[in-house]
Image (cartoon, rainbow, N blue to C red):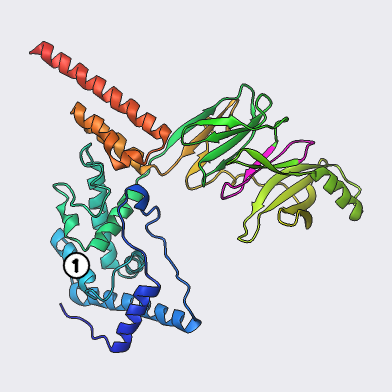
Amino acid sequence: MKHTNINIISLLLLCCTHLMLFTMDHKPLLGTKRQDTELSIIKTKTPSTTNQHNTEKAFDEIINNLDMCIKNQYGGLNSIDIVQAQAILNTVGNYYGNKLKLTDRIIYTLYDTNNLFKKVITFFEKHAQENLNAVTCNTLDIVCDPAQNQPQNFEALDKLPQSIKAYVMNRAYHSISNEYDMILSRHTQNILAFDICCATDQAATSSDDIPLFLWDLKTLTGVMLNEQKAPLHIRFHTTGSQLATVTQQGPITVWCPKTKTKLHSIDVHRTIAQLCKTLADENSCYNIANLTYLISESNITLQVLCLAKVGLQGPILSWNFDTQTPDYRGYMFGSVDMSADFIDAKYCASSPQNSFFDRKNLYIKKKLCPALYLCKRAIQTEKNKESLENIKKTLLYNELTVHEKKIVNEKISRRIELLEKQNNILSWLL
């Protein structure tokens, strides 16, 4: 293999790039070490603008060198078989030797730059997907771990450079589209409001029978909070550190979901009345239309949108809990769009009737559940009862929530029952 000449300055820049910018390690998918988003880019703060410019320049040089290397050696290929695909990826992996470690950012950028490299990566990603779909109870912890040798018929993955092997296996794992519905059933009267916090796997619901109920979405259990009247609006802080609620006439109450205690109480209607008097607003009769936490690294600010009972307009107020003072942020004219409030990468509200509420129950859809998918897939094809029970000993099973483990346990029991019936029928026939 012909290497492009690299001068001393380029080598120094490459080392600087490796140390300062590309620190992302390839780790197994299982356990706490798994990379949840394999395509994320880590941007390390550089000491100065000059250094940052140099590292970016060096990065561009890396991509250009790898791109030209592929084009020069393999640009004339009309079709690619698995041997040639391995050769291309090994050429990329060995180009800099030990001088530079291929990171996800390098691989992803080259993926977007070089069409041939993209085809080869896509080829092995499909191969890794086939490996996942062929999972058994005995290979659950293998097909998700790039550090291990893969099962028979998929040894081609083991012949790739380790960084590229981890990349394609991660892409295949996270491409699994699997979701399931959960039903939060506790209220005896219609649910009036709810919100979901993905950071802490929690939800909150309100109704006239149980004014405020805090759910644990991992177990589908929860506790009642000490609220007297059912809130009409509920909002979690993005981090889950706070939960804000407001009733028709009462104050805004801010809760700590972790301790289940009240943190703040805001007499918002009194503040609105004082504001209207200051602004000479004759329409002082407003309803709370929406609660929103403003994202800030320095403090926690709750924004409240108020709309007049007659006419869709009203003031926007915010409370900074560090200063304990309200701020007037202007007027809003028009309706409130709530359609995007329930869209999230992890959870979303849903129901078979395509409405968020089904009378007394709240339907929540959990998305992106590759671990649950693989466990169910292994159960479907397994014919050995002992192997089925061994699923509970795997690392992948331990990643499941309490509720997901119940789903898997039920499927294991049903599969064992089916196998026993089949064995009894076979014994009777013999």
Q: Residue 365: give x, y in percent of width and height.
A: 48, 37
Q: Which residue is found at the position 62% from the left and 59% from the top?
A: 296
- Residue sticking out furthest to the top: 428
Secondary structure under the numbered disc 1 in the rendered image: helix
Q: Residue 185: give x, y in percent of width and height.
A: 54, 26
Can residue 350 be seen here? The reply is: yes
Residue 216 relative to residue 169: left or right:
right
Crowd tier of the residue under label 1, counting other residues whose Cα lies within 10 Å: few below 14, some 14–19, many 20 or above = some
Whether residue 162 appears in magenta in the rendering, the answer is: no
Q: Which residue is found at the position 17% from the left and 47% from the top?
A: 151
Towards the viewer: 241 or 376? 241
Q: Is residue 183 above or below residue 199?
A: above
Is the C terminus in the top left, top right, bottom left or bottom right quadrant?
top left
- Residue sticking out furthest to the left: 430
Q: Which residues are magenta?
A: 233-251
Q: Residue 223: give x, y in percent of width and height.
A: 58, 30
Can residue 352 be seen here? The reply is: no
Residue at the spot of label 1 = 90
Towards the viewer: 186 or 78? 186
Q: Residue 290: give x, y in percent of width and height.
A: 70, 45
Residue 39: image quadrant is: bottom left
Q: Amino acid at mark 1?
A: Asn
Residue 209: image quadrant is: top right
Residue 367 relative to residue 389: left or right:
right
